[in-house]
């Protein structure tokens, strides 16, 4: 089967969980014998970074932009025709509130082939300032509805999003939950000392965050909680892996300096190499995600694969991934004392942390990408046969 995948970014621009999901599902589909073409935006190349035409058998098509203002305001040049030219058997696009999904679904319609749309988040329910929330609601209820109606199947990564999509007009028989997950090799033990040595991280314990450096991720709350942790564990190191706007990173550095723990913070920048990323998870004592919203978190699944206890928030799909008191300690978003006390508990109660980590690892074994790709493949086959979802 020839499959067209369409996403804003792709390798090596692995901006967030969506890119890793598309990459991992695609590589598994290639292993299963399918021909996978990923259509992504063509952006200015970063110095020293290679932008290949293929990776692990995935064929990459970088489509130029007519204009590119923000993450959501992008107009791709001739995307619809580029997809049609490859004559795929199925078109699978990601994120409903984007022009590329409208173009991709239109291409599928012209080709008379099945179309699939994966929804990572319902954008109007994500906490934002009112001046951003208003346009997002308009986008959801106007453009979003138009795109959602055009897809043959709508895949959603967490069950908590289903009620919102039903309200937006998606019929129940077109909806199916297909969660994110981990590579099978992520379950293999990894040496955390490799990461520690590379970044010169001295001292213990290590509290790790891996994800975008963005205000919505709750990092300012984590930083305000950090002094309470450092008071009892003076050598504790807060390690942040990921990229984001330089202005926000400067804000975090200023906050750490003002609170007196700048020396206890390490920013590594983004990590694209899989083994190095897994070594980062293996190195930590606690993985923390203080986010204001997540559909489902790729980083939570990956931390679980290395048997790490989680401290996170009761937001979005996180309670679907981990249960409070079993694999994680969950707090309310913005509860800085709760964050600090949860981290401290896991640092002090080593047996509790170990048991949580073991339960997390056992649970995540059900969420490997080979199994998830098999589920996606079956959806493609059902749509192509005209059977519908079932």
Image: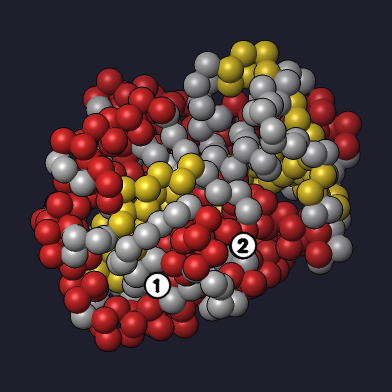
**Quadrant of residue 142 within the rendered picture:** top left
Q: Is mark 1 on a helix, strand or loop?
A: loop
| Residue 112 visible in the current orientation | no
Image x and y of residue 232, in percent = 13, 65
Per the image, the residue denoted by label 2 is 275
Q: Residue at x 30, y 66 (%)?
A: 205
Colour setting: secondary structure
Q: Answer above or below: position of 324 versus 249.
A: below
Tell me if mark 1 has few (under 14), some (14-19) or many (20+) residues whose alpha carbon lies within 10 angstroms of its own: many
Would you name the residue on which mark 1 appears?
A: 308
Question: Mark 1 to mark 2: distance in Å?
Answer: 16 Å
Name which residue lies at 16% across and 35% down: 258
In this view, 143 is above or below 280: above
Image coordinates of residue 59 in percent, x first then y, are: 82, 44
**Mark 1 / mark 2, whichever is N-terminal:** 2
| Horizontal relation, residue 91 to residue 247: left or right | right
Q: In front: 340, or 301?
A: 340
Residue furthest to the top in view is 66
Secondary element at image label 2: helix
Q: In which quarter of the image is residue 8?
A: top right
């Amino acid at each position: 089967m020839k499959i067209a995948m369409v996403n804003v970014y792709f390798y090596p621009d692995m901006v967030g969980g969506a890119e890793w999901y598309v990459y991992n599902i695609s590589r598994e589909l290639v292993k299963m014998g399918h021909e996978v073409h990923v259509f992504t935006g063509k952006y200015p190349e970063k110095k020293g970074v290679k932008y290949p035409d293929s990776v692990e058998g995935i064929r990459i098509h970088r489509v130029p932009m007519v204009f590119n203002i923000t993450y959501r305001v992008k107009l791709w040049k001739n995307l619809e025709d580029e997809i049609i030219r490859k004559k795929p058997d199925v078109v699978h696009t990601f994120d409903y509130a984007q022009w590329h999904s409208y173009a991709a679904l239109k291409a599928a319609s012209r080709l008379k082939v099945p179309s699939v749309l994966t929804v990572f988040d319902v954008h109007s329910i994500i906490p934002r300032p009112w001046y951003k929330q208003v346009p997002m609601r308009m986008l959801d209820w106007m453009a979003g509805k138009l795109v959602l109606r055009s897809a043959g199947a709508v895949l959603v990564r967490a069950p908590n999003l289903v009620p919102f999509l039903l309200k937006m007009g998606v019929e129940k028989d077109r909806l199916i939950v297909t969660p994110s997950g981990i590579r099978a090799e992520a379950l293999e033990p990894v040496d955390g000392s490799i990461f520690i040595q590379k970044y010169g991280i001295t001292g213990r314990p290590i509290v790790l965050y891996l994800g975008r450096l963005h205000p919505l991720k709750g990092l300012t709350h984590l930083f305000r909680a950090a002094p309470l942790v450092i008071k009892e564990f003076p050598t504790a190191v807060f390690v942040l892996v990921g990229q984001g706007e330089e202005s926000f990173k400067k804000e975090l550095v200023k906050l750490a300096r003002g609170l007196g723990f700048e020396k206890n913070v390490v920013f590594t920048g983004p990590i694209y190499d899989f083994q190095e990323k897994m070594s980062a998870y293996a190195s930590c004592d606690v993985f923390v995600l203080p986010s204001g919203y997540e559909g489902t978190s790729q980083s939570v699944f990956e931390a679980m694969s290395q048997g790490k206890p989680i401290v996170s928030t009761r937001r979005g799909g996180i309670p679907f991934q981990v249960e409070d008191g079993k694999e994680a300690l969950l707090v309310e978003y913005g509860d800085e004392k709760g964050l600090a006390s949860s981290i401290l508990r896991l640092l002090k109660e080593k047996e509790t942390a170990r048991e949580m980590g073991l339960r997390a690892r056992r649970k995540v074994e059900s969420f490997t990408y080979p199994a998830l790709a098999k589920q996606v493949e079956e959806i493609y086959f059902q749509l192509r046969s005209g059977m519908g979802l079932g």
